[in-house]
Image (cartoon, rainbow, N blue to C red):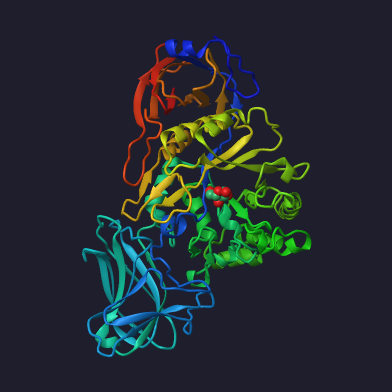
Amino acid sequence: MVAFSTLSGISAVPLLLSLVQHAHGISLEVSTEGGNSSSSLLYGFMFEDINHSGDGGIYGQMLQNPGLQGTTPNLTAWAAVGDATIAIDGNNPLTSAIPSTIKLEVSENATGAVGLTNEGYWGIPVDGSEFQSSFWIKGDYSGNITIRLVGNYTGIEYGSTTFAHTSTADNFTKATAKFPTTKAPDGNVLYELTVDGSVAAGSSLNFGYLTLFGETYKSRENGLKPQIANVLADVKGSFLRFPGGNNIEGYSPENRWKWNETIGPLEDRPGRQGTWTYYNTDGLGLAEYFYWCEDLGLAPVLGVWDGFALDSSGGTPLTGDALTPYVDDVLNELEYILGDTSTTYGALRAAHGQKEPWKLTMVEIGNEDHLGGGCDSYPERFIKFYDAIHAAYPDLIIIASTSETDCLPDSMPEGSWVDYHDYNTADGLVDQFNYFDNLNRSVPYFIGEYSRWEIDWPNMQGSVAEAVFMIGFERNSDLVKMAAYAPLLQLVNSTQWVPDLIGFTQSPEMTFLSTSYYVQEMFSTNRGDTIKEVTSDTDFGPVYWVASSAGDAYYVKLANYGSNPQTLTVAISGTTTGKLTILADSDPEAYNSDTQTLVTPSESTVQASNGTFTFSLPAWAVAVLAAN
Ligand code: AHR
């Protein structure tokens, strides 16, 4: 019966025809001895602000265009309420970073409530938690201010507060109000801030950088929306790569993601025109990424700009001395993250509320430098960043943004890794099953982005194909250290890239989970530390497998990339019972979306007979047997 090994480096020789497997099923025998150690970081997340995944997504702040940021400010999402008008005011800046504020001009004869509304990011998710709103106000006013969350079409109120406030025409003062809410039935909710029209009649008031938060994940200030953070937490991922992706690159050096403009008080963050069509507030900034990692137990993988922007007409790639200021900038960023409080930027971090350095072990130099004209200069650019970072922080793992040898230095320096991306068809991902088997083991791999591409929603065939690809790299997880599906999140009302792992709307529950999400969850939450040899009477395809162990527990991951159900016998000596989780649909095009949830995993308890489990693997299925 011993014919095929699932440990890489041992050849596979077919013994039986696939006809026989259909008739008699597939037998697997998991060795309880030996094995290769598996990367403890294997499954994790890649994040950048795309599809409003940050602003309007996981970042807790809910008002769109909160500070009229940018050099061409506009009033997107804002409207006037009552007998008043609103306008952009460049003559009453809040700070140098927030040069524009909203001027509310109240009519001479105004009475009743006058003020402004914000429609959020295609709605506001009112989940029944305590909400908090803050804003800056300037102008002579002494009276009540009311904040309401109100049904857009219904007028039903889901939360409100009224408080007395006095402001003057001299300075902006900050007001913060907390109030309870009741859960709204959907996201059709407006934020409304009004003052007493009879008090303000004939005058004007300026409002700057307004915010609205519900309860945040782990109650973190300026934190994450729990609805989205919770489904990430359920995956039990190990790392977070941020802040891009293409979004770190920008279209010119000036348009790159600038760490130092994403830190400190919100009113000191100018924001930036993001790569993915919309303006980024940068309220979700460098510190917030580190708190995200801390709160979800993720190892940060920090991407840094490396002299290459997306549009070569923007004057990049930069090489030679032109790179030096950007290398220095990365060293400053690392000092902000890792330096103690005696350093300039470590002290700045402490002044921003984080005395202890954060934990950081991995830095990635750029993004996809094999594309768009980045390749030729990347060896020089990578080495320049590597040398400077390695000299200052010799323990950091430094990751090249490509695995293409033509774009890398002739020999990769000590402790460096490469990043491999694969957006592919379903068949293309399955073809990659063996890709890592025979690669040189000297330079570890990070699969920084992958997914079944060119469909609107992750579907069953694509998710099974991803599972086959994942089984391929889990078998090789001595070499493949980390891997992340991308993109991670998608606001369905404003999407720049499909498919995505987790979709959301502004309904109070927010998320809906794709078939690919369930594959990530099943694989990540069933991890061993040692990959075990599996022998079989059958070759790989259409069924693929990998087995691992941690102590007495065994995990067998399976994918059936085909339309015929398969009978499996899995022998693991000494085991008696198991939990079998199966995600399957006989329709390979079945998918979950904001309007339908067709496929979810099912769980059952299975018993072994003399250490052997027998069960059926449905068509187009991903399964995990957790046994002990
Ligand atoms: O995930 C979407 C984009 O795909 C990323 O920003 C980029 O790195 C890749 O090309």
Q: Considering only vertical position in the picture, is 493 above or below 179?
A: above
Image quadrant assignment for residue 456: top left
Which sits in the foreground, 161 or 88?
88
The N terminus sits in image quarter: top right
**Residue 131 picture location, percent across and down:** 32, 63
The C terminus sits in image quarter: top left
Q: Say whether residue 300 is visible.
A: no
Image quadrant assignment for residue 102: bottom left
**Residue 339 picture location, percent across and down:** 64, 59
Which sits in the foreground, 45 or 497?
497
Instruction: Classify residue 430 as left or right of residue 514.
Output: right
Q: Considering only vertical position in the picture, is 144 above or below 626?
A: below
**Residue 255 picture location, percent across and down:** 60, 64
Q: Residue at x 48, y 24 (%)?
A: 554
Q: Considering only vertical position in the picture, is 536 above or below 50?
A: above
Q: Say whether residue 90 is visible.
A: yes
Q: How many marks?
A: 0
Which sits in the foreground, 368 or 264?
368
Q: Considering only vertical position in the picture, is 568 above or below 407?
A: above
Image quadrant assignment for residue 135: bottom left
**Residue 60 picture location, percent across and down:** 41, 59
